[in-house]
Amino acid sequence: MGALEDLKFKHCKDSSEEAPLPTDIDRQKSLEKNRSPDKGLLRCLIDALGDLIYIKDRDGVYRGCNKASENFVGLTEAEQIGKTDFDFFDEDMAEVIRKIDREVLASGREYHVEEWITRPDGRRVLLDSRKTPFYGPDGEVAGIVGISRDITERKQAEEALKEANRELEAFTYTVSHDLRTPLVPIIGYSDFLRENYRERLDEQALECLSEISKSGEKMLALMEDLLSLATVRKLDPPAEPVDAAEVANEVVSGLSGQLCLAGVEVEVGDLPALRVPKTLLVQVFDNLILNAIKYGCKRGDTIEVGGERRGERVTFYVRDHGPGIPVDERESIFDVFYRGITGQDKEGTGIGLATIQKIARLLGGRAWVEETPGGGSTFRVEMVDIPLSPPGK
Ligand code: ADP
């Protein structure tokens, strides 16, 4: 049996090492009696694990391994003990492994690496490995303990998912972009006929044209919202921090028509500056303020925009004092195409909040809604600021 279950770590005191009190013979006997079953149990546990576990000394010589490691290399533990990676893998591969092991030994720190390994049977696998130094009785680093997990399938699934997402985004982009083009003349011509041939058309024909135009407008809004959802993507951070209050005020100016019509005001408080792409911030404020006007305000109301920074995390909020969102809808309103109870009698696509959630996740945070004290909705969007690199980097 190998040395795996005998390993003693510098920081893990082994109770079996403690000298028994001379009078405490019973305790000593019980320790002796329990030692082997404990070791057997520990060995069972180590062998039952699906992860590869192995120990090597300072020279890279194997001192022990578990069952998963035996299967991986295709040799029993007894056959592996006394050998090095140069006996199992080709020279280049063994050299790479040895280099990492040497770094662990030299630094005395744990290393976490993903390494592509060609198994002795020729299969290429991606191992997620943690390599930790262990210490001898003299307190010096005596070798390394490695725990490696085969993550090849997980990685392949992640790549396939990424590819599927890319394809889906490209599809959504093409569909929404290409369908938008013929929609514009459909709406344009039906409006033209209604306005210029009003005298020559009967009531029913005019109604039909009005329906064509309304449905076209709805579809256009859907295409535009889908297009913004599909085009949210990771952009390079700006060189300098963006003044979020300035961005929010620009958005408010752009919405002055809607605000005036609704008789609503927006109060923009102190907002932290941060290094995230301005276009994404514009989308967040624009969507949330428009929603607040549409669903959360009556004449004379004020929408509040604020934000705070906690370390590298920045959270913005847009607060209204309207009907609020029922508790059971607070998560689903962020799903694509979900329209809430407050949106039943209003036009909309159910894509705006999904776009905001996508932006927040892209920026390392999330979006959620809370009840405003006293009633209403407070939408919060958290994002992680990208720190400026220190000069010279
Ligand atoms: P849309 O506005 O097109 O319906 P959104 O994703 O922006 O799509 O919003 C989803 C739903 O969330 C809306 O249909 C509405 O019911 C609800 N909602 C969003 N903002 C507010 C708000 N400020 N107050 C009340 N309800 C809101």
Image: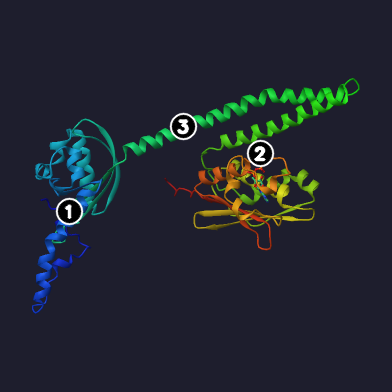
Residue at the disc numbered 1? 43
Left or right of 115, for residue 58: left
The answer to whether the beta carbon of the residue marked 2 is less than 8 Å from any atom of ligand 1 is yes
Q: Nearer the viewer, mark 3 or mark 1?
A: 1
Q: Whole-Å distance between the Cαs marked 2 and 1? A: 59 Å
Q: Earlier in the sequence, mark 3 or mark 1?
A: 1
Disc 3 residue type? Answer: Ala
What residue is disc 3 on? 164
Identify the image quadrant of residue 71. top left
Return the residue at label 2.
349
- Amino acid type of the residue tagged 2 in the rendering: Thr
Residue 105 visible here = no
Q: Does 68 appear above or below 227?
A: below
Residue at (12, 68) in percent of width and height: 31
- Left or right position of 377 against 17: right
Q: Dividing the image into 4 quarters, which one contains the C terminus?
A: top left
Between 260 and 333, the residue placed more toward the observer is 333
Q: Secondary structure at mark 1?
A: helix
Q: Are there few (<14), some (14-19), or many (20+) residues within 10 Å of tag 3?
A: few
Q: Is residue 31 above or below residue 172?
A: below
Q: Find the residue positioned furthest to the front.
A: 204
Q: Secondary structure at mark 3?
A: helix
Can you give x and y, in whole percent of width and height, for residue 217 in the image? 73, 31
Give how far across and how far down residue 271 sits, in percent.
61, 55
Marks 2 and 1, the one that precedes in the sequence: 1
Which residue is painted at 63% across and 42% down in the image? 352
* Distance between the alpha carbons at the discs numbered 2 and 3: 24 Å
Task: Please tell me which residue lies in front, 98 or 39.
Answer: 39
Looking at marks 2 and 3 on the same chain, the residue that comes earlier in the sequence is marked by 3
Residue 60 is tagged as none
Left or right of 242? Residue 66 is left
Up the image or down, 202 lies above or below 84; here it is above
